[in-house]
Image: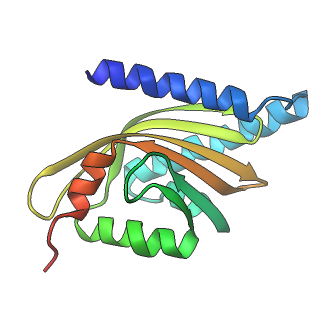
């Protein structure tokens, strides 16, 4: 089942990427994407080490879209994203969430990160999830993200009572 999920996630990534970059050309785009890929890879390495986070790549006016059909799906600007999702989620973690493995793909100003992450929850349970984030860069900052993840696992964390 996990292999099927990963296969489907990769297929969605490939299809979405091919649709979103139609018409982008030139060596200039390739060179820009390579540097952005390196930025994301470095950010994830620092996140794993606990010294930084890919959220530091986000612009102040970013838009974050959670794909799917659930109560958290939709597009958020920075402040509502932090207040409605990130802060409540982090309050239920015993320690920081960390990526355990990742792959980074690039095309033009779009960088795709497919990764697994885990953390210990305040109730002692282990949180594990697989993610695919599509980062769209403008310059050195990410202005748009489309995120795919196992929403039932994410929602289960937000259902934990915080004292």
126 to 3, vertically: above or below: below
Give residue 151's position: percent from left, percent from top: 33, 47
Q: Is residue 94 left or right of residue 9?
A: left
Quarter occupied by the C terminus:
bottom left
Q: In this view of the protein, can residue 59 be seen by the observer?
A: no
Q: On the rendered structure, is 74 left or right of 71? A: right
Count of residue discs: 0
Coordinates of residue 92 in the picture (x, y in percent): 22, 66
> Toward the viewer: 14 or 43?
14
Residue at position x 42%, y 37% in the image: 115
**Toward which corner of the image does residue 86 lie, by quadrant?**
bottom left
- Residue 97 drawn above or below residue 30: below
Residue 68 locus on image (x, y percent): 45, 45
Q: Position of residue 28 (x, y in %)?
A: 89, 34
**30 left or right, relative to 45:** right
Colouring: rainbow
Tell me if residue 107 comes above or below residue 82 in the rendering.
above
- Left/right placement of residue 128 relative to residue 28 reads left
Residue in view at x 42 percent, y 19 percent: 7
What is the quadrant of the N terminus in the image? top left
Q: Residue furthest left?
A: 124
> Observer-nearest residue: 54 or 81?
81
* Residue farthest toward the bottom in the current orientation of the protein: 163
In the image, what residue occupies the spot 62% across and 31% down?
16
Is residue 151 visible in this depiction of the protein?
yes
* Foreground pick, 83 / 56: 83
Q: Quadrant of residue 25?
A: top right
Report the residue at 29% width, 52% height from top. 154
């Amino acid at each position: 089942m996990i292999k099927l999920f990963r296969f489907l996630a990769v297929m969605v990534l490939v299809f979405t990427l091919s649709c979103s970059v139609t018409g982008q050309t030139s060596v200039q785009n390739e060179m820009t994407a390579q540097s952005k890929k390196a930025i994301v890879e470095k950010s994830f390495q620092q996140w794993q080490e606990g010294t930084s986070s890919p959220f530091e790549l986000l612009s102040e006016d970013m838009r974050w879209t959670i794909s799917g059909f659930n109560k958290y799906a939709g597009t958020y600007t920075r402040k509502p994203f932090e207040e409605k999702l990130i802060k409540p989620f982090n309050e239920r973690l015993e320690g920081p969430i960390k990526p355990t493995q990742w792959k980074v793909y690039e095309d033009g100003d779009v960088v795709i990160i497919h990764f697994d992450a885990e953390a210990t929850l305040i109730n002692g349970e282990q949180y594990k999830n697989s993610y695919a984030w599509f980062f769209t860069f403008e310059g050195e900052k990410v202005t748009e993200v489309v995120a795919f993840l196992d929403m039932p696992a994410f929602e289960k964390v937000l259902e934990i009572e915080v004292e």
